[in-house]
Image (cartoon, helix red, strand yellow):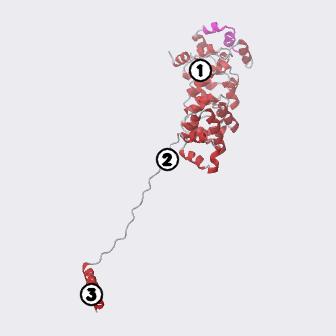
Amino acid sequence: MNDWDRLMGAKKRPVVGQSSNKFINQEMSKINLDNPFAEYLSTLSLQQLLRVPAEKYKSAFSDMSASKIHEVFAVLPYEVSVQVAGYFDDEQVEAYLTDLTDEDWDTMTGDEWQTWMTILPSDDFKEIIDEMTEEEIIAVWEYFTDDMTTEFFAGLTNLEFTGAEWKAIFTLPASTIKTSIFDRMETIDQFEPVGKFVGDKALDKFFDDLTLEDWQNMTPVEQQATFNTFEDRDEVIEFIHSMFKADPEVVSDFFGNLEIEDVMEFLDSFDKKDYKLLSSEEWTAVKADIEWPEKEAIEMEPIEEEPVEEEPAEEITEKKAKFNKARGQMQKQKQE
């Protein structure tokens, strides 16, 4: 069993519903069809198509250009298309997709897109959409089921997206974006392109559409990235108000995972008169899980005393003798 057969057997998916003869005829009307094999296949039922021997496809494709093979795939329902794609090895599939023309890509059916999404590793399929505009990517994703989208992102090892891809990604449900992409990001740097390519309106909608469960299961990196989107203290306060009402523990966990510098800057922005902007309960939630930095012990430098020069013993003896003589004379004068 080759890799394609194994992959095909492991990743069978439901059809979006684009396999009807009416749809095929609509798509085929875009192609100047002069392909007897494709015309023959278009007359068969699903069960008949599934029984066409693999050798018949291989023999027919051996004399066809990539564009002609595309005409064949264009008349095949998803179930058959996946089966036929599984007859060829990685190099043959890569050569076929590489040789397709712009017109071929423009006339690709929903079942074809589903097929290559199923057959290709996620990173390879991403290389295809890397070259697309936002509108083209969105049009392709419309053919996919939720499971297909989830499996595509789960299979990616490359989470660097183009600007068009980021914009298209933000048309997906917020929870899908979080669980499929953001949960897998490990550094703040990976979030930077989001702010560059996605507008404030799309970001606001994303945050508004997150569920409470999404907020409860944010990673520390996601929490820091979220904090970095706040433009001022008022936005942070607004976040605390709304999230505290939903679940105070989310507030505690959120601030407990932020960089301590950001926490201290936020806290230092409050004068005594500003404390009332948050309730005492909200302040408790904010500070509950913060790991305060330990106060560093101040090391006192020892005071160096200047050395005292001791007088020679002879000089001390002479001074004492003079002192005793003077004291004796004073006592004598008092007696007289």
Percent x, y of residue 262: 57, 45
Question: Magenta residues, as a range?
Answer: 33-50
Percent x, y of residue 335: 28, 90
Q: What is the C-alpha distance between the residues marked 3 and 1?
A: 120 Å
* Viewport quadrant of the C terminus: bottom left
Q: What is the C-alpha distance between the residues marked 3 and 2?
A: 71 Å
Q: Where is mark 1, residue-wise? A: 118
Q: Where is mark 3, residue-wise? A: 328
Q: Is residue 204 magenta?
A: no
Q: Is residue 40 magenta?
A: yes
10 Å crowding of disc 3: few (<14), some (14-19), many (20+) = few
Q: Where is mark 2, residue-wise? A: 293
Q: Amino acid at mark 2?
A: Pro
Can residue 257 be seen here? The reply is no
Q: Quadrant of residue 55?
A: top right
Can residue 92 be seen here? The reply is yes
Q: Amino acid at mark 1?
A: Thr
Percent x, y of residue 11: 56, 18
Q: What is the C-alpha distance between the residues marked 1 and 2?
A: 51 Å
Of circles 1 and 2, the one toward us is 2
Whichever of callouts 3 and 2 sits on the residue coming sooner in the sequence is 2
